[in-house]
Image: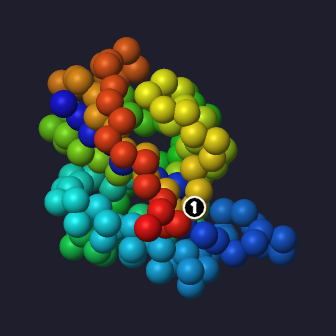
């Protein structure tokens, strides 16, 4: 079994006068990221790899999760394909994950993250809010088998769910 925590970056500053990739998290976004990471810890979840878009808002969200989990920030895997991704980009990232890893967190952006979650056909969501977590498990031994595997929704959580 393999488990993925698909996470949309936390709330970021507006991009009106700044390059989109350089948008930083707001204070609320930082607070939400820490809170959502803590919620995962409260579920006694361990994450073996943190994989992120290199855009500042996604990477900072990932770093805050890693910090809460006590993971060194330099172990974060940054993949440009996770910046403004399409469904195929997620699939390509997943099939390349080391098979020794069983539980990974992937940090990315909308609209791609919502489209990918819906493509799994285990739940239908209108929108993944900022800092939301779509957690699912695949009945596979190798990440390369993910696309055709039986999948199970574990949970969908976001900051405004109390």
Residue 40, by quadrant, is bottom left
The residue at the far right in this view is 16
From this view, report whether residue 140 is shown above or below residue 43.
above
Residue 103 seen in the current view: yes
Regarding mark 1 in the picture, which secondary structure is present there? loop
Residue 81, by quadrant, is top right
Name the colouring of the figure: rainbow
Residue 144, by quadrant, is top left
From this view, report whether residue 21 is shown above or below residue 14.
above
The residue at the far front in this view is 162
From this view, report whether residue 134 is shown above or below residue 137.
below
Percent position of residue 57, x then y? 57, 67
What residue is shown at x 15% (from left), y 38% (from top)?
100
From this view, report whether residue 156 is shown above or below residue 92.
below
Query: Within 10 angstroms of label 1, few (less than 14), some, or many (20 or more) residues?
Result: many
Mark 1 lies on residue: 130
Quadrant of the snapshot with the N terminus? top left
Percent position of residue 49, x then y? 27, 52
Left/right of residue 121 with respect to residue 1 in the rendered view: right
């Amino acid at each position: 079994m393999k488990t993925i925590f698909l996470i949309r970056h936390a709330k970021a500053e507006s991009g009106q006068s700044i390059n989109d990739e350089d948008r930083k998290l707001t204070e609320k976004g930082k607070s939400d990221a820490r809170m959502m990471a803590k919620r995962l810890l409260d579920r006694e979840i361990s994450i073996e790899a943190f994989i992120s878009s290199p855009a500042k808002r996604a990477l900072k969200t990932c770093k805050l999760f890693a910090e809460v989990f006590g993971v060194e920030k330099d172990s974060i895997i940054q993949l440009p394909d996770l910046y403004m991704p399409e469904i195929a980009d997620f699939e390509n990232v997943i099939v390349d994950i080391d098979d020794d890893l069983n539980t990974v967190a992937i940090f990315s952006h909308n609209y791609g993250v919502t489209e990918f979650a819906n493509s799994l056909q285990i739940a239908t969501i209108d929108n993944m809010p900022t800092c939301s977590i779509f957690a699912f498990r695949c009945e596979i031994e190798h990440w390369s088998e993910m696309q055709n595997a039986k999948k199970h929704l574990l949970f969908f959580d976001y900051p405004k769910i109390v």
